[in-house]
Image (spheres, rainbow, N blue to C red):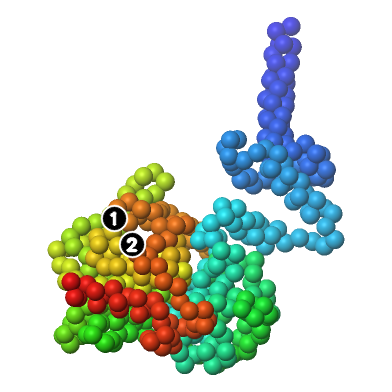
């Protein structure tokens, strides 16, 4: 009798363990893909290895996960042709970052990441324009460089780029990805389609890419011994260039200075900090703060600029330009002239640790001015608000005659007033 009980127990217990194991397995799988999706799959697929993406239950509604799995199941079994789920899933990953509605946070596929890194380290070969995303996520021409293919073809400031080589780019929210499509090998053709708001029409331009040599800074002496420095972008060498131009102007005896940051989309954070350090007195220049309130601060030393100063800005002055303008404004070191700036006060980083070769550019923190202002979404309000004449809406800053530049004339008047105090 005891022997019989042992035999039954030896059989019963393994059966129970096996039953519990499969019940747990099926329960977890069904939880992942929903009952309806599970039973619709062939029996042979019930025991295949499953890969899962995990969310805490309070992060994502269970119904949305079920909907995702149902879409996948329908496409897998009923779509009119076989689906490349690797490619489709890459787009789904992009959707995860796009769902944040932050144009500065974007997932790069392995191919896009490779192109991005090559673009960072290589020469600039393109058509010679500076761009930014407008409020409708359309890539907008901010500046057209002199002696460039774009200038020669007739592309104008404020043109909206809608196609590159007949590919619609209006759904792409990351400016870098569109720019990479515009850039290429020297002496190759690129076709750009733009929408021109002033004329309410679409225009197509075919250009030959070439190496673009850009001078990001220029200077001159205006009437009344006022120095003028125009910074088009904060590249990785701009502080050294700024110091050279400033020293040269001061050696020539200038009595005041105007720094023109109009249409400047930003650039190197560390370079603009060094320029601000040259201008403002000892103290805080800018700080960043992440979601956990971790704070990173940048300070200036005792050296400062002892000249009457005006800074020109407009709606295309962004990021690093706003850091410099806001810092000067907070310290009262100069008067800000023009129109409200763009309002980009976010810090981005790129995570390159993806095993598939992809990458994620994401927003990490927020910039704050010395007084604690966040410029993101707000911009920097000028001390003296002056609109540029409408006839120059599509004209690069350097092409506007000084005697017709109302913003520049207002800045000159402010500097002269300070000189005469």
Q: CA distance from mark 1 to mark 2?
A: 8 Å
What's the residue at 24%, 74% (across, down)?
A: 417
Assign a secondary structure to mark 2. Answer: helix
Which of the numbered marks, if any, corresponds to residue 384?
none
> Counting residues from the N terminus, which is met first, the one under dot 1 or under dot 2?
2
What's the residue at 36%, 79% (across, down)?
A: 408
Assign a secondary structure to mark 1. Answer: loop
Q: Whole-percent x and y of residue 90?
A: 63, 60
Vertical relation: 345 (above or below) 180: above
Q: Whole-percent x and y of residue 258?
A: 29, 77
Q: Nearer the viewer, residue 144 or 33?
A: 144
Q: Residue furthest top?
A: 1
State yes or no: discs 1 and 2 in contact (Cβ < 8 Å).
yes
Quadrant (top left/top right/bottom left/bottom right) for the N terminus = top right
Which of the numbered marks, if any, corresponds to residue 326?
2
Q: Whole-percent x and y of residue 106?
A: 54, 60
Which of the numbered marks, if any, corresponds to residue 370?
1
Q: Is residue 273 left or right of residue 180?
A: left
Q: Nearer the viewer, residue 255 or 207?
A: 255
């Amino acid at each position: 009798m005891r022997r019989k009980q042992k035999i039954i127990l030896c059989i019963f217990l393994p059966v129970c363990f096996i039953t519990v194991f499969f019940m747990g397995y099926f329960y977890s799988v069904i939880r992942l893909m929903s009952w309806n999706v599970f039973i619709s799959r062939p029996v042979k697929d019930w025991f295949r290895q499953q890969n899962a993406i995990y969310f805490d239950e309070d992060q994502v509604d269970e119904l949305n996960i079920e909907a995702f799995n149902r879409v996948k199941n329908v496409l897998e079994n009923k779509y009119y042709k076989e689906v490349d789920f690797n490619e489709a899933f890459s787009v789904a990953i992009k959707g995860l970052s796009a769902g944040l509605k932050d144009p500065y946070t974007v997932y790069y596929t392995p191919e896009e990441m490779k192109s991005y890194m090559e673009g960072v380290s290589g020469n600039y070969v393109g058509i010679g324009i500076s761009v930014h995303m407008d409020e409708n996520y359309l890539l907008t021409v901010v500046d057209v460089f002199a002696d460039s293919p774009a200038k020669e073809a007739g592309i104008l400031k404020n043109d909206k780029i809608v196609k590159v080589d007949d590919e619609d780019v209006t759904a792409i929210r990351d400016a870098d990805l569109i720019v990479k499509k515009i850039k290429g090998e020297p002496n190759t053709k690129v076709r750009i389609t733009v929408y021109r708001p002033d004329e309410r029409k679409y225009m197509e331009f075919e250009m030959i890419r070439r190496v673009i040599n850009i001078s990001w800074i220029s200077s001159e002496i205006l009437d009344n011994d006022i120095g003028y420095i125009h910074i088009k972008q904060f590249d990785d060498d701009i502080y050294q260039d700024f110091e050279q131009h400033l020293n040269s102007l001061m050696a020539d005896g200038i009595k005041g200075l105007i720094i023109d940051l109009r249409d400047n989309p930003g650039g190197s954070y560390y370079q603009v900090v060094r320029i601000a350090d040259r201008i403002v007195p000892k103290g805080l220049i800018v700080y960043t703060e992440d979601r956990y309130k971790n704070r990173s601060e940048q300070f200036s030393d005792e050296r400062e600029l002892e000249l009457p100063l005006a800074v020109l800005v407009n709606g295309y002055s962004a990021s690093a330009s706003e850091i410099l303008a806001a810092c000067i404004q907070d310290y009262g070191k100069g008067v800000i002239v023009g129109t409200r700036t763009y309002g980009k006060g976010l810090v981005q980083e790129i995570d390159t640790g993806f095993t598939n070769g992809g990458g994620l550019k994401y927003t990490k923190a927020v910039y704050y001015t010395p007084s604690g202002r966040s410029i993101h979404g707000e911009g920097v309000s000028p001390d003296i608000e002056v609109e540029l004449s409408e006839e120059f809406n599509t004209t690069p800053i350097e092409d506007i005659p000084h005697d017709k530049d109302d913003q520049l004339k207002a800045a000159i008047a402010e500097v002269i007033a300070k000189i005469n105090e």
